[in-house]
Amino acid sequence: MVPVPRSTISCSPIPETADEATINKEHAEIYSFQRSLDNKFEHLSGSINRFISSISDYDTFVRNPPNPVDFSDIFNDPLSDTLFSSSSSPSPIPNSFNISSFNVNGLKTPGQGSFKMDQIFSFFSHNHISFGGIVDTHLSPKQMKFLSKRVCDYASFHSDLDSTKHGHSSGGVSLFIHNSLATHVQFYQSHSSRILSVDLFFKGNVKLRIFVVYIPPTNDLVLRYEVIDQLISLISQTSSQNFHHAICGDFNMNLEKFYPIFLHQPQVAAKRIHKLFHYLLSHNYEDCTPLIYLVP
């Protein structure tokens, strides 16, 4: 190698044209946007991975996020193609469980039930869902068992349906568990048409309980408070039995609005209207729900 004397090297920047400057600026903006997305997905992956990395030291809940559109329309919205698409399936996170929840807003309508279940199965497969809760099915266990045949590779468990006058045949919750984990199921129980629990036992005396819940909306406060009180009682019992546990479903509440109240207005946060979220946050539960908005 022969070193080149400094005096023989001459470097001067080549001026950018206007088009090149514009292209470079666009590339920089695209890169910045991609990094922003990467950071968000890394944060989400971290939340999911923390849930049970050999089952974690805390418990968690997953709720249906408040969307600016009618969530029941997601099955008919063309924008949902990206949600259910199988073209770019994300890689599963090692040593973790993926949990999801859907409010299907009823599966009784002829044709709609099968269509929605096919979409849900596509979502489960695409996102490597381990535990998939669906709520407000309006169907009995027998009816759900028939529809569940469309969801391959998953075992399903269903709550009873409240057909009394008070229940208006509403409610109905189910949990789908991937076959790779379903062999660990030891027991399941329908506590009501709106609360279902499934117990799984793992090596090392590790016990996991998954709750699927559907909290009624505020137009029936009596029933709403009954379900909340029952759920809190069940959670307390579960903790005393040394179960790791997770709660997924539709809470019909907006946690984003409750956080400021919980942090800055403790007396208001403790009122009955906020009882469930107040209990969960006061007992160190973590919300690991990603907020997914359908942007027109």
Image (cartoon, helix red, strand yellow):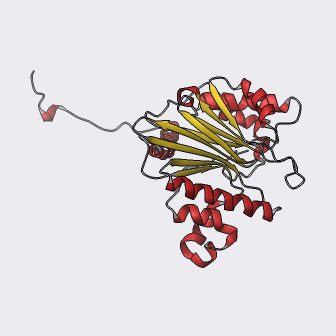
Name the quadrant containing residue 154. Answer: top right
Toward the bottom, the furthest residue is 267
Q: Is residue 166 visible?
A: yes
Q: Nearer the viewer, residue 236 or 96?
A: 236
Q: Position of residue 137 (x, y in %)?
A: 78, 41
Q: Residue at x 64, y 29 (%)?
A: 155
Toward the left, the furthest residue is 2
In the rendered image, the quadrant that contains the C terminus is top right
Q: Residue at x 55, y 52 (%)?
A: 238
Q: Position of residue 198 (x, y in %)?
A: 60, 41
Q: Position of residue 192 (x, y in %)?
A: 73, 49
The tally of labels here is 0
Q: Position of residue 264 (x, y in %)?
A: 55, 75
Q: Is residue 45 visible?
A: no
Q: Residue at x 53, y 51 (%)?
A: 60
Give left or right: position of 70 versus 195. right
Q: Residue at x 54, y 28 (%)?
A: 183
Name the quadrant containing residue 103. Answer: top right
In the rendered image, the quadrant that contains the N terminus is top left
Give left or right: position of 110 versus 1. right
Q: Nearer the viewer, residue 276 or 34?
A: 276
Give left or right: position of 223 versus 281. right
